[in-house]
Amino acid sequence: MQDDEEQGQRPRSSSQSSVASVPTEFDFINRLRVRTALEAQRSPNQQSVALGIGDDAAVVRSAAGKDTVITADMLVENIDFRRRTTPAHLLGHKALAVSLSDIAAMGARPRWSLVSIGVPDDLWPSEFANNFYEGLLQLAAQYDVQLIGGDTSRTPEHVVIDSIVVGECAPDSAIKRSGAAPGDLVFVTGSLGGSAAGFRLIERGAHLADQQLGANETQILDQLLLRHLRPEPRVGWGMVLGQEKLVTAMIDLSDGLSSDLNHLCAESKVGALIKSTLIPIDGQVVELCGRRALDPLQLALHGGEDFELLFTVKPETVGKLPKRVDGIGITQIGEIRDASDGVKISEASRVWDLTSGGWKHF
């Protein structure tokens, strides 16, 4: 979204230049620039932004006594989402949400966002880009995150999105995956399996507000679909846990409980034992998916994209944990063990290895 670099660099198709009603890339950028400038006037972060959208790069004044935390995520059509089943405004929400979740997992406060998007020729004249940013900016406003730049481009066939979020935390206070120790207790926020259930139902042809179902079942279905299409990052929990220094290690559940727990244990060089009966499976998953031959426990363990937080806490610190943040509770699901014990899950007297079974790009 950088003006100087774009001029004269990327050729535009004749169809773009010949249709007067179709906005150019720079028309779109300028409209977005005006909107973000107006919203920035209401933001307490504005004094930190020396230069926003419109130049080759954004400039953010570094606050004294702060560490900067930066994350980047990519969403690729037909890999991470399908355009036919994902409304543009929900895609904009999700593109930002996945990056906010990473910042939350570091115990930091999100501050600024840079989002780049590539769209095919046939999609540009539509309202897709406007609706995409509408959904993104609504979520950004919820957490006082300012969009300060990015880029737009043409792609041959599919939509490609790159989301960068910059956050802040106190010096040397970012929560890593590598701090867990034997004896620590394992917690998760919220509930698990909802996003994976929503994804499976979409793959089977489900749509929002499906009129072929009864009113109660339609409401449950919509809520599960939205868990996948419009995830809610646990920004509040991340900030509380980070600012109060309550946890030893943390990761967000993007790839699935089984995979992300193994990631955390590998970085911390520890093992873990999880109790299956303690895993907070989304109640709507149990109610709706059991009748559709979908195993709720498998969805909770391996489904991914719940964007809840998985964290470890010393036993003596547990009493200091809030019961709820932003209306979301937490559940203890196990404990950290020695690395030699491996990563395992138990149900009654049965114990088995909990291997990574979540999402893999390759």
Image: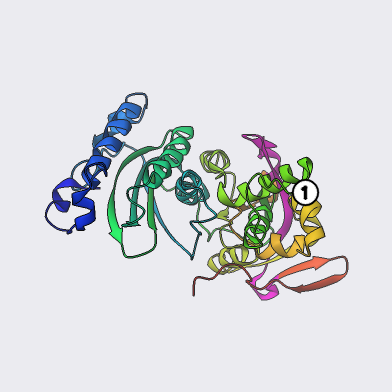
Query: Is residue 235 in sight in this rendering?
Result: yes
Q: Where is residue 76 drawn, in percent x and y?
A: 43, 62
236 and 336: which is toward the camera: 236
Q: Is residue 194 above or below residue 319?
A: below
| 6 to 155, vertically: above or below | above
The kind of residue on which mark 1 rests is Gly
Mark 1 crowd level (few <14, some 14–19, many ≥20, 10 Å Cα): some
User: Residue at the location (52% across, 50% down)?
Assistant: 105
Q: For this rendering, which residue is in front, 61 or 286?
A: 286
Q: According to the image, label 1 marks what residue?
A: 283
Residue 327 picture location, percent across and down: 66, 34
Instruction: Examine the image and state in which quarter residue 51 appears.
Output: top left
In the rendered structure, which segment of residues is drawn in magenta? 318-343
In the image as oriented, which residue stretches furthest toward the top? 42
Task: Say if 139 sits above or below 290 in the image.
Answer: above
How is this picture coloured? rainbow
Q: Can residue 53 be seen in this view?
A: no
Q: Which of 19 and 11 is in front in this view?
A: 19
For the point 75% across and 53% down, which residue is it? 285
**Magenta stretch holds residue 127:** no
